[in-house]
Amino acid sequence: MQTSEIVLVGGSGKTGGRIIKRLEERGLTVRAASRSSARPFDWEDRSTWRGALDGASSAYVAFQPDLSVAWAAEAIEALARVAVECGLEHIVLLSGRGEEGAQRSEAALKASGMNTTILRASWFCQNFSEGAFLEQILSGRLQLPAGEISEPFIDADDIADAAVAALTDPRHRNKTYELTGPRALTFRQAVAEIAQATGRAIEYEQVSMADFSGGLADAGLPRGLIELLEELFGQVLDGRNSNVMGGVAEILGRPATDFSEYARRTAATGLWSA
C-alpha cells in the first residue's frame, strides 16, 4: 500500500544525512537506501532497487560515483522505470552543473513522465572538511591541478535545505534549480579563507594533472575515481560554472551561505586544528 514515506538513495553521503535529519525533525517518515542500509540499494546491483524503493511516495537520488560517468544516464532511466512501477510520485535528483552526462541523466529522468525536481550543484564547500581535501588541509598544504578559475562553492547544508523544500512542497515539482554560493572563489582564495578562519598557515599549490593523478594513484585510489577527478579538474573546471546563480534564494527565500561563513563555522568545531 502506498505511504508518504520518503526514501533517500545515497542517504549516507554528504547531503543524505543532512536531509534525513531535517525530515525527521519535521516528523516525516524517511529512510536511507545504500549498500549498508536495512533495505540495501546498490547502483551496480539492480536486483536491490525494487526492494529499496517499494512503499515510498517520493525519493531523493544522489548518484554514485557521479552523473558524468558513461553509464549514469541509462541507470537513471532504469531507476525511473522501477520507481514508476513501485508507485513513486516524485523524484528529486541531485545533478551536476555543466556536465553533459548530468544533463543526459536529467533528460532520462524527465522522460519517465514522473514529477521531478532537479537540483544542480557543483563543488561543495564540504570537500574541504568532509571529503577529498581534508587530509591535505590538515597537513597545511593543498595541492590541486586548479589555477585561477573561480567556483561559487555551495554549502551542503543549503543543498539539504533545498532538497527538503523540494520533497515537501509541491510547488517545486517539475522545476530545475541551479544551486551555488553567493560568491565565486578560486581554490587558492578558498584555502586562504580557511587559513584565516583557523589562524593556521595553510598553503595552496597548483600542480600538474600528471603529478596530481600520480599522487592519487600512490595513495591507493581506484583508477575509476582518479579518472573522474581528472575530468572534473581538466574539463568541468574551465569557467563554465563560475557564474553565481540564484537557485538557493529562489527555492528557499533566503541568500546562499557564503564560503567565509562555512569556513568560520567549521573552524569553530576544531575539525581543522593541526
Image: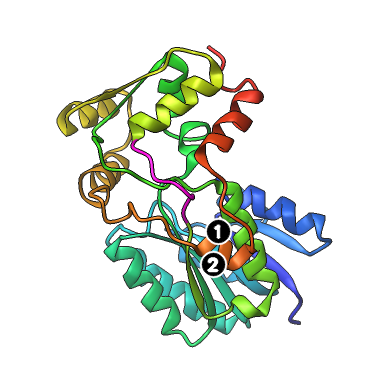
Residue 11 in view here: no
Magenta residues, dominant SS class: loop
Q: Which residue is mark 2?
A: 49
Observer-nearest residue: 85 or 244? 244
Residue 81 marker: none
Residue 93 screen position, x and y as percent = 50, 66
Residue 178 screen position, x and y as percent = 45, 63
In this picture, residue 10 sits left or right of residue 72: right
Q: Which residue is mark 1?
A: 41
CA–CA distance in space, label 1 to label 2: 6 Å
Question: Residue 271 sits in which quadrant?
Answer: top right
Label 2 environment density (alpha carbons within 10 Å; few <14, some 14–19, many ≥20): many
Q: Residue at x 44, y 77 (%)?
A: 109
Q: Residue at x 44, y 81 (%)?
A: 110
In this picture, residue 223 sits left or right of residue 4: left
Q: Which residues are magenta?
A: 180-186
Q: Amino acid at mark 1?
A: Phe
Q: Amino acid at mark 2?
A: Trp
Q: Residue at x 39, y 45 (%)?
A: 184
In this picture, residue 58 sits left or right of residue 238: right
Residue 119 is one of the magenta-drawn residues: no
**Image marks 1 and 2: residues in contact by CB distance under 8 Å:** yes
